[in-house]
Image: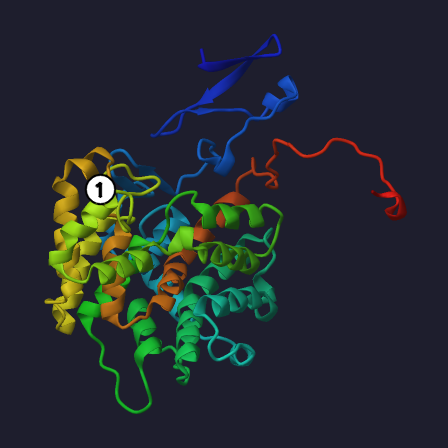
Amino acid sequence: MAETAKITIGGKTIDLPVLKGTTGPDVVDIRKFYAESDAFTYDPGFTSTASCESKITFIDGDAGILLHRGYPIGELAEQSSFLEVCYLLLHGELPTASAFTDFEHNITYHTMLHEQFDRFFQGFRRDAHPMAIMTGAVGALSAFYHDSTNVDDPEQRMISAHRMIAKMPTIAARAFKYFRGQPFVHPRNDLSYAENFLRMCFSVPAEDWKPNPVLTRAMDRIFILHADHEQNASTSTVRSAGSSGANPFACIAAGIACLWGPAHSGANEEALNMLMEIGTVDRIPEYVQGVKDRRYRLMGFGHRVYKNYDPRATVMQKTCHEVLAEVGDSDDPLLKVALELERIALSDEYFIERKLYPNVDFYSGITLRALGFPPEMFTVLFAVARTVGWIAQWKEMIEDPAQKISRPRQLYTGATHRPYVAVEKRG
C-alpha cells in the first residue's frame, strides 16, 4: 500500500500521497490539497517545496554530494570536458565518440553571431556593466534566430539549445571587449570551447595571442563546476518563464537577469573582497574574532544547500593553485590568506558547529582574477557556464506532460473590500 501523509484541517482529514524519488527526501504530493481543503500551503522562497520532477541534477547538502545525471561533479571536472558535460545534461547519457564528434562540431560551427547583431552592442553606453549587456543581448537573439523559437517543435528546441551553448561565450566576450573599449574578436573553429572563449576575451590586434593549456583547462573546469545546480533561483526563473510557452532565448535572458542579483551570483566577488580586506595572514585572527563577534561576515563559507564541504570547492582549490603557479602568482598574498583562513575555519569549533565549510566561491574569485577577469565579469562567466543547465532544465520542463504554467498562490494580508470614495469627499 502506498504511503500517505494525513493533514487535519477544519475537522476534515485529508490523505496526501507520498512520492519517492530514486534518492533524496520523500515528497508529499499536495496538488489536490486546495481542492479538498480550500486551503493553501505556505512556503516563502519554496525552500520546502518540490516544484518539479527532474532527472538532471541531484544535491545532498548534508553529505556534500553533487551529481549530474548520476555522475559525481569531481569526476566530471577532473576527467571530462565542458562540452561533454553539456551533452550529458542535455541528453542524459555521456556521448559515444562519434556522437561527441558530431556534437562538438555542431556547437563549434554555431559560435558565430549574425553580423548585424554586433550593431546591437553599440546601443549601450561604453561604461555599461557586462551583465546589463548580456541580459539585453541574449533577449535579442530571438529577433535574429526566430527559426528556432517554436517550443512545440523538438528539432527547433534542440537547435536553439545548441545555438545558445555556442553563442553565449561569443556574446560574453563581446560584452567584455565592449566594456574594455577593445575591438571584437571573432571565434575560430579550430579551437576548443574554453580556448576560443579565452582568445575572444584576451586577444588584441597589436600582438599574437598564445594559448595556454593550463589556463584553458582551468576555464573548462570552471564552466563544468557551474554548469547546473538543481532548482536554484535562476533555474526556477527559467522554468517559470518557460511554463508560459515563452521562447527559449527569452527564458534564458530571464535566468541571466535573476542570476545578476548579488544574493545569487555575487558570492565569489564578495569572497575576493573579504580576502583583500584582510590583506595579510597576520590580520586573520582579528578578522576571525570579528566574525565570531558578528562584526564581520565570513564570505565564501557555508552554503544554503551544502551543510558539508562543497564538492566543487575541492576541485576549485586545486585549479586555483594550478593557475596561480602558471601565471607566476603562487606567492599571491591573497592565496596565503585564503589557505590560512580555510585551515582555521576547518579546525575551529565555532565554524565546525555552524558547518561553515569553504564553498566553490571561496577560491573562484582568486582564480578568475589570475586569469585576467575583473569582478564585473564574474557573473558573466557564471552565466556562460549555467546556460547549458538552464536550457537542459527548460527542455525537460517542456517535455514533461505534467508541467503547467507556473502560478504560485499567496497568503493575503491586505485590506478587505472597501467602497470607493470620490476624491473631493476624502478627508
Q: Specify few, some or many for label 1: CA neighbours under 10 Å numbering under 14, 14-19, or 20 or more.
A: many
Relative to the observer, which residue lies in front, 104 or 177? 177
Q: Is residue 123 above or below residue 220?
A: below
Q: Residue furthest top?
A: 11
- Report the amino acid beneath label 1: Tyr
The answer to whether residue 35 is left or right of residue 134 is right
Among the 4 quarters of the image, the one containing residue 208 = bottom left
Q: Is residue 238 above or below residue 206?
A: above
Relative to the observer, which residue lies in front, 363 or 244? 363
Counting from the top left corner in percent of width and height, residue 270 is at 32, 57
Residue plotted at (32% across, 60% down): 269
Q: Quadrant of the C terminus?
A: top right
Residue plotted at (58% across, 45% down): 243
Whether residue 63 is visible to the viewer of this picture, yes or no, is: yes
Residue plotted at (84% across, 35% down): 419
* Residue annotated with mark 1: 309
Whether residue 52 is visible to the viewer of this picture, yes or no, is: no
Element at label 1 = loop
Q: Is residue 274 above or below residue 108?
A: above
Residue plotted at (59% across, 65% down): 147
Among the 4 quarters of the image, the one containing residue 334 = bottom left
Counting from the top left corner in percent of width and height, residue 112 is at 45, 75
Among the 4 quarters of the image, the one containing residue 267 = bottom left
The figure's colour scheme reads: rainbow
Q: Residue furthest bottom?
A: 206
Relative to the observer, which residue lies in front, 353 or 55? 353
Counting from the top left corner in percent of width and height, residue 95 is at 32, 53
Relative to the observer, which residue lies in front, 305 or 35? 305
Counting from the top left corner in percent of width and height, residue 14 is at 57, 13
